[in-house]
Amino acid sequence: MSFVKLENVGKTYGSISVLKDLNLRVDKHEVVCLIGPSGCGKSTMLRCINGLESIQAGSIFVGDLEVSSPIVDINAVRRRVGMVFQHFNLFPHMTAIENVMVAQLRVLGRDKRAARDMAFELLSRVGLSKKIDKYPEALSGGEQQRVAIARTLAMSPQALLLDEITSALDPELVGEVLEIVRELANEGMTMLLATHEMSFAREVATRVCFVAEGGIYEEGPAEKILSNPDRPKTQAFLRRLVESHRL
Ligand code: ADP
Ligand code: MG
């Protein structure tokens, strides 16, 4: 059963058409990787799914909630699908544990003790039990991103949207963040992720979607799309990756 469903979606910025008649479904427990050149619309897709951007045509569903409906409860959508961004966007004046607590207090109305217990459990899970009282500036990029993931998980989302979550990190810090994603995948978390980590896509993706021309240009198992795609733009993209030693 599809958990996230985009049907004939059109998205424009002024006169620029970014998504054109886009169709995409993500089933429960699937890990779908969006790949494609910068500017092809991956972030826009993810942002439309959790209602950060409005669409001009088509419809988007998350479970039984229609995100594209003018009367949707957008907070209900965002509790159901958590999003993690390239830039971690932690509150700089709050410690790690406070960052993971704040939305629990304000959005879910949890009491402070329950929020703290949950935050501690999640920070432990991402390997940061010893750093709960550190401010973001005292944490590495990889640690900050792990706090951001814990913060998103604190909403108990049923699916995650991950937008290039390792691309702002120094290369040696990428692994620790991907390890968390790998664990979430193993636990059956439904995920849609934009990534340029092709080896990671190959390892975790149940499906890889190459984005071009405003939609899913070609999709299939990672092995197929990343080794032997059928269509010319996917082939050209792969050739560029190989030439720049990124595949
Ligand atoms: P990707 O994540 O694949 O790199 P994006 O979704 O960020 O691509 O961008 C897709 C296209 O939409 C790009 O051409 C980009 O310049 C344009 N775009 C993205 N956000 C905005 C915005 N807020 N206003 C105008 N154009 C935008
Ligand atoms: Mg992007």
Image (spheres, helix red, strand yellow):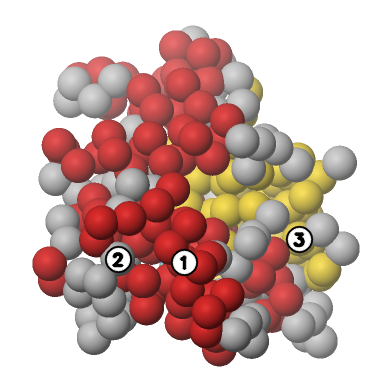
Question: Do labels 3 and 2 touch, CB within 8 Å?
Answer: no
| Residue at mark 2 | 132
Q: Is residue 48 visible?
A: no
Question: Do labels 1 and 2 touch, CB within 8 Å?
Answer: yes
Tell me if residue 7 comes above or below residue 87 in the rendering.
above
Tell me if residue 244 comes above or below residue 134 in the rendering.
above
Q: From the top left corner, tell me how far across and down residue 21 is, in percent.
A: 70, 54
The quadrant in which residue 175 appears is top left
Between 135 and 203, the residue placed more toward the observer is 135
At label 3, the amino acid type is Val
Query: Residue 29 vs residue 230: left or right?
Result: right
Q: From the top left corner, tell me how far across and down residue 122 is, in percent.
A: 47, 57
Query: Residue 195 vs residue 68: left or right?
Result: left
Q: Name the residue at 23% across, 80% down.
A: 92
First reached walking from the N terminus: tag 3 or tag 2 = 3
Tell me if residue 149 comes above or below residue 195 in the rendering.
below
At label 2, the amino acid type is Ile
At label 1, the amino acid type is Ala
Q: Name the residue at 24% across, 25% down.
A: 246
Tell me: is circle 3 under 8 Å from ligand 1.
no
| Residue at mark 3 | 62
Question: What separation in Å lies between label 3 and label 2 (alpha carbons)?
Answer: 32 Å
Point out the frontmost of discs 3 and 2.
Answer: 2
| Residue at mark 1 | 119
